[in-house]
Image (cartoon, rainbow, N blue to C red):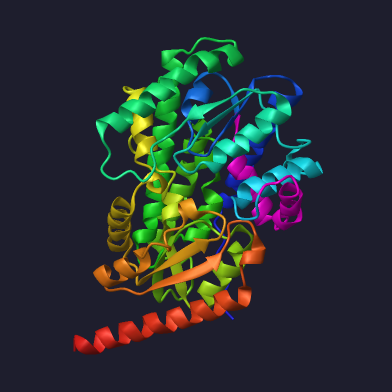
Amino acid sequence: MAEARTELRSTAALRDTMSAYYKKLGDAVTHKSAPVAWCTSVGPAELLRALGFAVHFPENHAAMLGAGRTANKYLPVAHAQGYSQDICSYLTSDVGAYLAGESPLAAFGLSGVPRADVLVFNTNQCRDVRDWFEWYGRQWNAPVVGVNSPRSVGDVTDAEVDDVTAQLEALVPVLESVAGVRLDGGRLAAAMKAAREASELWERCLQTAANKPSPFTFFDGTIHMGPAVVLRGAPEAAAYYHVLLAELEERVRGGVQSVPGEALRLYWDGMPVWGRLRALSTTFAEFHTAVVASTYCNSWIFSMLDPADPWRSMARASVELFIARSDGPKERYIERMVELYGVDGIVFHDCRTCPNNTNTRYGMPRRLSEKLGIPTLVLDGDVNDLRCFSDEQARTNIEGFVEQLADARTHASRATR
């Protein structure tokens, strides 16, 4: 049995921060204290904050359904509406929960997902988010607007940034009409500054895991990334990450290990398996293996945001997003992460219903393994549909992978004597 992991003290502050966000969202619905906008997780949240919207992120809600292991209850409800089992299980579990009249937001006083006054998508992550928002738009007769971003982007060009910049600027008249206010340049700059500060702090939190032993894992990150997602452009996110960073730096100074007896270090590419976070975390810990970094948690680092150049910097951050890139830039990015975090191997999650955030199907694991000289493992699963995940198969694969890594280290050690 693995030694118990040490809970981060900051978790209490995280709960307070997230609870305050949900309560404020509920107040916007109940007391009409602010218009409500839905925004995709890497959509133009800063613009919406500047216009005074209370912002709801449906991917966060879907992740709550997954983590609470209720998603599979709702998936058939959406399937019965003609939405395929093969499309995004975030979409289908969220729509199914709405039709069932249930939501984990009830724990925060909301009767369900907040009814939107406007829904704003960005397809930089996938087309599914547009289909998702259009479903709700039809339910509520609410406007659905957004950005149709380039996909499979190689080297980012000015033409691509110009295109997204123009689409972002074209949103303003529609959003001003719904919000009932004119966009104030000072408020937009303030939202950009808040987002940039939180992004920098979140990046510093994640990079503490480059220390050996690591004070923080991918599994910790999936929980503590909440403010980076739902409070982007609001000062509360940076306030929380000051607290978390201080504790992580204290852990580094004290040599506190997130995984007791850390012997091996891994990188995770792809979506989390929300309903098996604890189980996977425990399994890796049993083998004294720390999953120290991930593409997923890094995706909420927006170093490009610039309050002095809001439109083009938002556009560039959108176009440069990992999930929107072609395999070449993606592989170069993972190579940098492998070096930065000093990992022994890479785990790729082949997410059944999320092909856009799955990088296993066109040879990437093999190419990276050959180039970097480290093993890779492909785990089959899904972000929310647990019918696609086998605990037994995952454990067997992880155990075999860890043995392979340990053998490789032993051979390398003998070769250097």
Most common SS among magenta residues: helix
Question: Of 88 and 404, which appears nearest the observer?
Answer: 88
What residue is at 41 percent from the left and 14 percent from the top?
185
What residue is at 39 percent from the left and 83 percent from the top?
404
**Could you tell me residue 125's position as x and y percent?**
47, 43
Q: Is residue 81 above or below residue 378?
A: above
**Could you tell me residue 192's position as x and y percent?**
41, 27
Q: Is residue 229 above or below residue 275?
A: above
194 inside magenta stretch: no
In the visual, does 177 lie left or right of 255?
right
In the visual, does 320 lie left or right of 144?
left
Q: Is residue 9 above or below residue 36?
A: below
81 inside magenta stretch: yes
In the visual, does 384 lie left or right of 336?
right
Question: Of 71 and 136, which appears nearest the observer?
Answer: 136
**Could you tell me residue 176's position as x and y percent?**
54, 13
Residue at the extreme left of the image, as rendered: 417
Q: Is residue 35 above or below residue 262?
A: above
Give the magenta-colored segment's residue range. Answer: 55-83
Quarter of the image holding residue 317? top left
Picture quarter with the C terminus? bottom left
In the visual, does 68 lie left or right of 360?
right
